[in-house]
Image (spheres, rainbow, N blue to C red):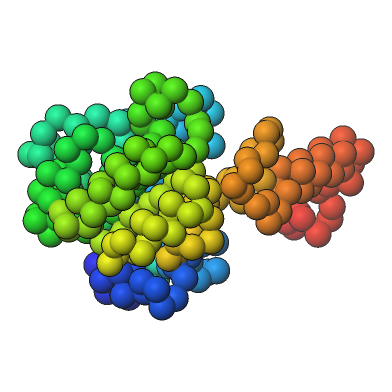
Amino acid sequence: MGTEQSIERTTASQITAKKASAKIVCLTAYDYPSALVCDAAGVDLVLVGDSLGNVVHGEATTLRVTMDDMLYHTRIVDRALKRAMLVGDMPFLSFSLGETEAVRNAGKFVACGAQGVKLEWQPGIERVVKAIADAGIPVMGHLGLTPQAIHRIGGYKVQGRDAAQAELMLREAGRIERAGAFAIVLELVPAELARRVTEAVKIPTIGIGAGPHTDGQILVFHDMLGLVPGKKLKHVKRYLDGFEAMAKAVGEYAREVREGGFPGSEHGFS
């Protein structure tokens, strides 16, 4: 699918080549309109994140997101992109049951238009990264806060604040790089640790709540546009109060319908 599109799109090797030379701009997208916006705005990499469980499905965690969910949304986003690289987020348990199953599931993302997949860290993840990369599928790692391990972590909180955690993260970043990953997401990591990781690896780091020293940044589309009301996240800058803007527009529509202002003669047919 999308053969003509994929020729023009940013590739994993192009993303890797931006290391320390140009900041990499990443955003999540989950549907056709949001992907169109990302592509038109010049985003380098679009991630179909399992965060769709939170901002699209209304779940408290990402753990109920399935492979079918992810493939459905990946297929839709693929239709919109012409230049941005498309990466699919492998959901809970889709890569934990052995390398063969992981490669098979990664291949399903590629069949839906993805040019790579993202895997959250877990013990022994480098074996899975290597297996998928050896199959010819670009892999993005994910360190720091890993939402699929939320029950083990004990909540959504900054990771790597103590020396042992920090050293583990540095070691795992090196292992993920050596296994063949083309980039690593660092989520909710102290800025100084993110800087150390960024300097320690030759592949780009993409930060989310990890300070300014990473090679690129990623945010959740709905968070940075303020599309979901509720608690504001410290690591997110809202570039638009989207929920209020849309609620105001819908309210105006409702008022005009009730008062007879819409539809007008210009909206009808003779």
Q: Residue at x 48, y 63 (%)?
A: 213
The answer to whether 222 appears left or right of 239 in the picture is left
Q: Residue at x 12, y 51 (%)?
A: 130
Quarter residue 269 falls in: bottom right
Quadrant location of the C terminus in the rendered image? bottom right
**Residue 138 against residue 90 in the figure, above or below:** below
Q: Can residue 217 be seen in this snapshot?
A: yes
Residue in front for this viewpoint, 32 or 209: 209
Quadrant location of the N terminus in the rendered image? bottom left
Q: Residue at x 49, y 59 (%)?
A: 217
Q: Position of residue 268 (x, y in %)?
A: 76, 54
**Residue 204 against residue 57 in the figure, above or below:** below
Q: Can residue 11 be seen in this snapshot?
A: no
Residue that sits furthest to the front in the current view: 163
Q: Position of residue 234 (x, y in %)?
A: 63, 43
Q: Position of residue 88 (x, y in %)?
A: 32, 49
Q: Position of residue 110 (x, y in %)?
A: 22, 53
Q: Residue at x 25, y 48 (%)?
A: 171
Residue in front for this viewpoint, 210 or 163: 163
Quarter residue 122 falls in: top left
Residue that sits furthest to the bottom in the current view: 21
Quarter residue 86 falls in: bottom left
